[in-house]
């Protein structure tokens, strides 16, 4: 009886996670594929993808999604790595600094977008401060459709602020499992901070970097609430177009086609990260 219970225990512990993943991830993905490839009469078709490709916003959505990915992910990884290394030095007050830096983790995407909207709008906090300091005589239009670079820049700043904390948390967790003996050995051999980071920290941190890049890239492909709050549809993105087709245009088939395309890009990016930052079982902590 006891042996039987012990054999069942692992499956019972995994069951809640498997049920959660099945109900909230696997089934919705299957439904999205079915919607994307299904015509109203139930037959299989590529009409939804053809309609998506002929959509006037498709090219811009594709362009801005990848531009955001290129601007946000590298900047966030570098910034998060610097912050994680700084906290890992355990300077006085580093715990307080960690709590402050982790605040964005508790804020939803839309709330973060609205908060940054109040900063960058024509009569927002930033223009008011610059005007009070005498730097600007008239408000600068950060969010004008006539100034797309400035609008794009505000989105990069807002999205970087919102999601850098999760990257930093992953990297900091990775730093915590690296034995301090390695750092002490590097110091004994006279390695500078830069050399220690390049030749000791980064190689040992590769599994965490891989996880951080995968998670952040997935989030970057899904970004749309901050973009909607700051730019509306002036700067379309893939996830936003999926939402727009489902809610505004009442066309779940094209919305699902956008979602399937985002999923394909996400899987491809994950595959590239696994290939480029390949780790062995010992480095990943499985051995």
Image (cartoon, rainbow, N blue to C red):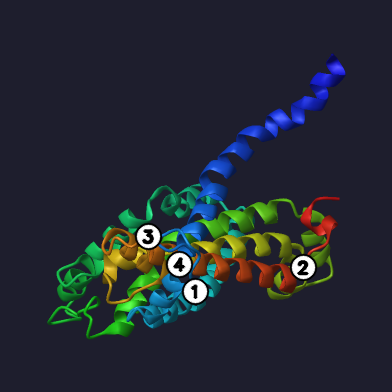
Which of 144 and 263 lies nearest the eye of the viewer? Answer: 263
Rendering quarter of residue 268: bottom right
| Image position of 170 (left or right of 165) | right
- Give the image location of residue 213, x and y in percent: 60, 65
Rendering quarter of residue 74: bottom right
Question: Could you tell which of marks 1 and 3 lies nearer the N-terminus?
Answer: 1
Marks 1/3: CA–CA distance: 26 Å
Q: Is residue 49 above or below residue 116?
A: below
Q: Residues within 10 Å of mark 2 (few under 14, many from 20)?
A: some
The N terminus lies in which quarter of the figure?
A: top right
Q: Nearer the viewer, mark 1 or mark 4?
A: 4
| Residue 278 badge | 2
Q: Which residue is mark 4?
A: 257
Q: Nearer the viewer, mark 2 or mark 3?
A: 3
| Residue 69 badge | 1
Q: Which residue is mark 3?
A: 252
Q: Nearer the viewer, mark 4 or mark 2?
A: 4
Which of 19 and 154 lies nearest the eye of the viewer? Answer: 19
Under circle 4, the secondary element is: helix
Confirm whether residue 155 shows in the render: yes
Rendering quarter of residue 140: bottom left
Is mark 4 in CB contact (under 8 Å) with mark 2? no
The residue positioned 16% from the left and 73% from the top of the image is: 122
Question: Could you tell which of marks 1 and 4 lies nearer the N-terminus?
Answer: 1
Under circle 1, the secondary element is: helix
């Amino acid at each position: 009886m006891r042996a039987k219970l012990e054999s069942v225990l692992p499956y019972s512990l995994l069951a809640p996670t498997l049920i959660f993943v099945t109900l909230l991830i696997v089934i919705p993905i299957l439904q999205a594929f079915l919607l994307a490839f299904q015509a109203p009469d139930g037959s299989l078709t590529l009409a939804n993808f053809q309609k998506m490709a002929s959509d006037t916003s498709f090219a811009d959505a594709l362009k801005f999604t990848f531009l955001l990915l290129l601007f946000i992910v590298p900047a966030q990884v570098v910034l998060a790595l610097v912050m994680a290394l700084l906290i890992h030095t355990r300077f006085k007050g580093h715990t307080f600094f960690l709590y402050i830096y982790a605040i964005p983790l508790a804020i939803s995407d839309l709330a973060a977008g609205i908060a940054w909207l109040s900063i960058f709008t024509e009569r927002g906090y930033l223009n008011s401060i610059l005007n009070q300091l005498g730097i600007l005589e008239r408000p600068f239009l950060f969010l004008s459709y006539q100034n797309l670079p400035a609008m794009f820049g505000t989105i990069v700043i807002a999205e970087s602020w919102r999601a850098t904390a999760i990257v930093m948390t992953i990297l900091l967790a990775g730093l915590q499992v690296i034995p301090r003996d390695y750092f002490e050995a590097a110091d004994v051999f006279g390695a500078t901070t830069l050399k220690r980071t390049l030749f000791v920290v980064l190689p040992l941190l590769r599994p965490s970097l891989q996880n951080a890049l995968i998670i952040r890239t997935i989030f970057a492909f899904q970004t749309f609430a901050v973009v909607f709050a700051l730019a509306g549809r002036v700067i379309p993105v893939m996830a936003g177009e999926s939402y727009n087709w489902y809610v505004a245009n009442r066309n779940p088939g094209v919305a699902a086609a956008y979602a399937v395309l985002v999923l394909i890009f996400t899987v491809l990016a994950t595959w590239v990260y696994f290939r480029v930052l390949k780790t062995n079982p010992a480095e990943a902590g499985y051995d």
